[in-house]
């Protein structure tokens, strides 16, 4: 595909780290939640191996927070998701699909409990603040819904814990997965969580003081020189290898959690007030399509089956059987990997699919390491 320029205006918001990104030589951006998100610094392969072997600092300020606070805060957040949040601990984050009354997925955020009456919804790419505000007004809830000035900075890679400890202290080592602590940095207490959109391990720093952004960036790079710290961004190859789903690509609002393999994040029997639970209980896993993985032993030319930018139709003879939602060549495993939404009728009798004359084996997601290594 021919490369095109991105016109940046006030509508495409910059971040407290934008000047540092430019100085670090960012080569490409995308738009995510109306903000600039870096996508490339060196080459795709060099960025990939650096993430897997060292440590990177990612500007993921586009991971916007919707803050819900007030007496009805917990009720509103629970209404939005079919996952039971009643036992969420203080400063814990939970992956919680947000679904509408038909059971369709509107976002797949991390929901963070800051207090009984204060929550953050840490968003994927969709305007959930508008949805939350509408529900609050419609249900007459005593709650405030707004987007706070919080700018997440991710530190990802096998050396991430060492770097975080150099900035925030040894206490960071005790943070468990999807848990967080308020840690001191230059006179401020900042929420730091063990999380991030990679399987290499890492943390996310939820910076609430924009004026500290460049200082934090500089401190991380100065402290991590011997760790080969570098600028980075969410990596499309690494996340597909790990089976991490991308809202807007692998999942859309036309899909329900059963189709996307998110059954384990639904509490269908819970006694909770959730807008989507009645519909999801009726669906009960009876779906006509499912998101699966496909592994090809050779590089595949998907361009001949492209129907939209980034989308590729799948056929069995003349019969349309599904669509590839994401795909990449894996430098680690020397295989072409794809995530595809395929009709269950086809999956019931077939274990392979053909694209451009190449046969691929169908597997459940996430991809199993032992399967990829074979």
Image (spheres, grey):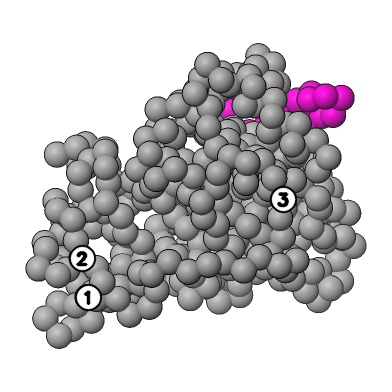
Please give the residue where the numbered disc 2 appears in the rendered image: 301
Can residue 243 be seen by looking at this rendering?
Answer: no
Dot 1: element? helix
User: Is residue 146 inside the magenta stretch?
Assistant: no
- The quarter in which the C terminus is drawn is top left
Q: How many marks?
A: 3
Q: Few, some or many C-alpha atoms within 10 Å of disc 3 (few <14, some 14-19, many ≥20)?
A: many
Q: Taking 75 as reference, is 314 above or below it?
A: below
CA–CA distance in space, label 3 to label 1 = 38 Å
Say which label, 3 or 1, has the lower sequence index: 3
**Are dots 1 and 2 in contact, CB under 8 Å?**
yes
Could you tell which of marks 3 and 2 lies nearer the N-terminus? 3
Residue plotted at (55% across, 57% down): 29
Magenta stretch? 175-190
Q: Is residue 332 visible?
A: yes
Q: Residue 190: x, y in percent?
A: 77, 32
Cα separation, mark 3 vs mark 2, equals 37 Å
Apparent side of residue 338 relative to residue 295 in the rendered image (left or right) = right
Q: Residues within 10 Å of mark 1 (few under 14, many from 20)?
A: few
Tell me residue 232's x, y (percent). 52, 40
Residue 304, label in figure: 1
Residue at 71% from the left image edge and 40% from the top image edge: 206
Task: Identify the element where label 2 is drawn.
Answer: loop
Q: Quadrant of residue 153?
A: top right
Q: Residue furthest top?
A: 170
Q: Position of residue 263 (x, y in %)?
A: 44, 56
Task: Name the residue carrying label 3.
Answer: 15
Which structural element holds mark 3?
A: loop
Q: Position of residue 312 (x, y in %)?
A: 30, 73
């Amino acid at each position: 595909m021919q490369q095109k320029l991105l016109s940046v205006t006030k509508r495409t918001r910059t971040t407290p780290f934008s000047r540092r990104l430019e100085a670090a030589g960012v080569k490409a951006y995308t738009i995510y939640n109306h903000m600039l998100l870096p996508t490339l610094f060196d080459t795709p392969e060099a960025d990939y191996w650096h993430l897997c072997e060292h440590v990177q600092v990612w500007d993921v300020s586009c991971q916007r927070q919707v803050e819900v606070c007030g007496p009805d805060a917990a009720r509103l957040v629970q209404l939005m998701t079919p996952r039971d949040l009643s036992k969420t601990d203080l400063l814990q984050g939970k992956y919680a699909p947000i679904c509408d009354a038909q059971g369709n997925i509107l976002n797949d955020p991390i929901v963070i409990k800051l207090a009984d009456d204060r929550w953050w919804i840490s968003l994927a790419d969709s305007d959930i603040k508008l949805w939350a505000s509408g529900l609050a007004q419609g249900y007459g809830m005593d709650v405030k819904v707004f987007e706070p000035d919080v700018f997440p900075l991710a530190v990802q890679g096998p050396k991430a814990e060492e770097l975080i400890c150099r900035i925030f202290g040894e206490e960071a080592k005790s943070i468990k997965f999807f848990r967080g602590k308020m840690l001191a940095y230059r006179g401020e207490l900042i929420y730091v969580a063990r999380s991030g959109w990679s399987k290499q391990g890492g943390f996310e720093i939820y910076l609430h003081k924009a004026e500290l952004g460049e200082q934090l960036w500089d401190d991380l790079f100065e402290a991590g020189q011997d760790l080969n710290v570098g600028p980075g961004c969410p990596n499309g190859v690494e996340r597909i290898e790990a089976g991490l789903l991308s809202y807007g690509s692998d999942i859309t609002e036309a899909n329900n959690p059963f189709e996307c393999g998110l059954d384990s994040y639904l509490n269908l029997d819970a006694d909770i007030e959730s807008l989507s639970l009645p519909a999801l209980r009726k669906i009960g896993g009876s779906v006509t399509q499912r998101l699966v993985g496909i592994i090809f032993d050779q590089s595949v030319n998907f361009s001949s089956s492209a129907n939209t930018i980034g989308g590729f139709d799948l056929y069995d003879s003349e019969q349309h059987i599904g669509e590839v939602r994401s795909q990449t060549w894996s430098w680690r495993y020397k295989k072409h990997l794809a995530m595809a939404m395929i009709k269950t009728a086809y999956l019931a009798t077939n274990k392979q699919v053909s694209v451009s004359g190449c046969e691929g084996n169908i597997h459940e997601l996430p991809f199993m390491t032992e399967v990829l290594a074979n």
